[in-house]
Image (tube, grey):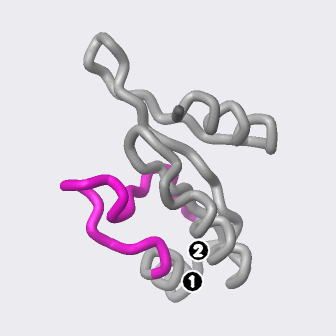
Amino acid sequence: MSFCHLHVHSNFTFGEGTSRVDDLVSKAKKMGMKEFALTDKEGLYGAVRFYEKARKVGIKPIIGTEVRLESGYSLLLLAKSKRGYSNLCHQSR
């Protein structure tokens, strides 16, 4: 059974994520992960770099973001397709 992280923050999430996208992908590869999600808060700042680096080393990139709702709760959004990614880009403006 394989394991997949679906909620990973990079250094683009100030104060919570400290690792650079390149380092996250490298570590995931060393751990034998086949896929994982980059879900920085309130934006897709590292998404393109993550996608390119992950694909280059054979990891399936899952792109997402964590958004804060007016209620104060957080919601994790993951793109399942190109259209989903487009929707995330639109939401992140």
At label 2, which amino acid type do we have? Met
* Residue located 66% across and 65% down the image: 51
- Mark 2 = which residue? 33
Quadrant of residue 75 in the image?
top left
Disc 1 crowd, CA 10 A, few/some/many (<14, 14-19, 20+): some
Camera-side residue of 14 and 23: 14
User: Is 16 inside the magenta-drawn segment?
Assistant: yes
Do the CB atoms of the residues marked 1 and 2 lie less than 8 Å apart? yes
- Check the image and report above or below for 14 versus 21: above
Q: Position of residue 81 (x, y in %)?
A: 79, 42
Q: Secondary structure at mark 1?
A: helix
Task: Provide the residue designation for mark 1.
Answer: 29
The outermost residue toward the bottom is 30
Q: Is 39 drawn above or below residue 71 in the view shown? A: below
Residue, far front: 93
Please tell me which residue is depicted at 70% across the width and 42% down the height of the picture.
85
In the image, the segment drawn in magenta is 3-22
Disc on res. 53: none
